[in-house]
Image: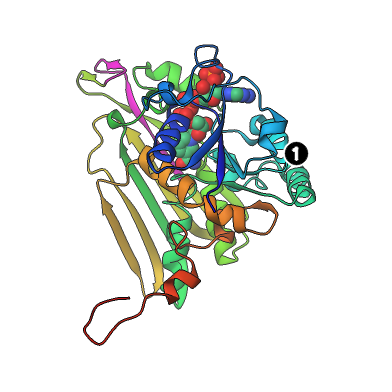
Amino acid sequence: MQQKIGLFGLGSIGRSIAQFLLDSNHDVVIAVDRDPEKVGSDLGSLVGRGELGLEVSEQLDPRIASDCDLVVHSTCSRFRDAFPQLSNIVETGCNSISTCEELSYPYLRNPGLSEQLDILARDRGVTVLGTGVNPGFLLDALPAFVAKACKRVDSFSASRVVEASLRREPLQRKIGLGMYPEEFAAKTSKGSMGHIGLFESCALISTAMGWKLDEIKQDISPVIADNDIRTDYFEIKAGQVRGLRQDLAGMAGETKIRMYLEMSAGAENPGDSVMIEGDPPVDLFIKNGLHGDHATVGRVVSHIGDVVAADPGLVTVLDLPTNPHGARAGLVRDTRLTGSGRLL
Ligand SMILES: NC(=O)c1ccc[n+]([C@@H]2O[C@H](COP(=O)([O-])OP(=O)(O)OC[C@H]3O[C@@H](n4cnc5c(N)ncnc54)[C@H](OP(=O)(O)O)[C@@H]3O)[C@@H](O)[C@H]2O)c1
């Protein structure tokens, strides 16, 4: 049966998810965003897919939401900001998948709110998941899955180098393109610079491995332009910031998990890597890296069926099946070889 899907948050990611859902004939029944420029407009027209007859509203209508199977939430990165929005969705008896970075492992920074949301979701019989590409896949679910082929894992190292000039405007802004180094340093010292989600990826891996970490250390530094660079959204002069680097170490006495993230305009050798020291050792490299925005849409949409079918509560990507797009065991068993080599 086709699920009825709602969309809460129609920024760059919400709109890309909307386009993909509409192009793949999903039944989109709710569109919410607080941006006055979007409120009142037709969702189809907003995402370039022609009039749909579905108006963007500022608030979630509980009557319509209660008839919806799942709401895709994409408004913010901090769980404490997402909490009231997700609680409203869950209250209506609707499942939810969110791209909120901290929700990928919410217990790390907000154990009390996580507990509350988990209790509410169980009470309403629905499931809530935080996912995306990073966190939610490349630096956590993927390495954890790869480790299933190892007899022994001593340590992990995962890295992602992103050519940021190909990414959406909010991401380019978030990584400080065009800032002066002093402004970057001041914002970093206040904790308002840097990608959110590396800590959560580290916590997901340690959970997957059953490791108890004593400390997670992180260092954030700017990447400075040697020459002028222009992206679709920013002009960066030589001497200004063209991106950032984040180094993270998850310690249990020694370093067990190391992560490196670089997002910069003009990044050298973009790509995603997973290295495992163990038996057998693993050295995996995805040349050019996964396109983060497209892969986030893929992660969210391919988990819709899993989340609707999952046991109620607040879950992580580690709790869900790894099969893409509903390829469930029953369907896999339906593939039969005939004598002629054709498949039934
Ligand atoms: N896990 C991952 O891999 C991953 C990948 C991609 C994105 N993300 C995260 O997903 C979130 C969405 O990304 P984005 O690029 O689409 O962000 P965005 O362009 O800033 O869009 C967010 C949209 O949500 C709206 N909004 C915010 N709070 C709201 C509320 N309380 N009620 C209704 N609407 C609200 C915003 O309106 P205003 O503009 O008026 O505030 C905006 O239109 C970001 O936090 C991003 O970091 C995670």
Residue ID for mark 1:
91
* Label 1 within 8 A of ligand 1 by Cβ: no
Residue furthest bottom in the image: 339
Residue 25: x, y in percent?
A: 42, 42
Is 335 placed above or below 104 here?
Answer: below
Around disc 1, counting alpha carbons within 10 Å, would you say few (fewer than 14), some (14 to 19), or many (20 or more)?
some
Along the horizontal axis of the image, is 312 left or right of 202?
A: right
* Amino acid residing under circle 1: Glu
Q: Residue at x 40, y 25 (%)?
A: 47
Q: Residue at x 60, y 51 (%)?
A: 215
Magenta includes 241?
yes
Q: Is residue 79 visible?
A: yes
Q: Quadrant of the C terminus?
A: bottom left
Residue occupying image coordinates x 38% and y 19%: 181
Check the image and report above or below for 219 versus 272. Answer: above
Q: How many marks?
A: 1
Q: Is residue 19 magenta?
A: no
- Rendering coords of residue 143 (x, y %): 43, 60
Task: Look at 67% across and 35% down and name the residue there.
Answer: 65
Q: Nearest the camera: 344 or 187?
A: 344
**Quadrant in which residue 45 is drawn:** top left
Highlighted range, magenta: 232-247
How has the structure been colored for display?
rainbow
Secondary structure of the residue carrying tag 1 is: helix
Residue 198: x and y, percent?
50, 44
The N terminus is located in which quarter? bottom right
> Viewed as shown, does residue 78 lie left or right of 187?
right
Q: Position of residue 74 (x, y in %)?
A: 54, 33
Q: In terms of image quadrants, where is residue 106? A: top right
| Image: 164 above or below 34 | below
In the rendered view, does 54 fall on the left or right side of 332?
right
Instruction: Report if residue 194 is visible in the image.
Output: no
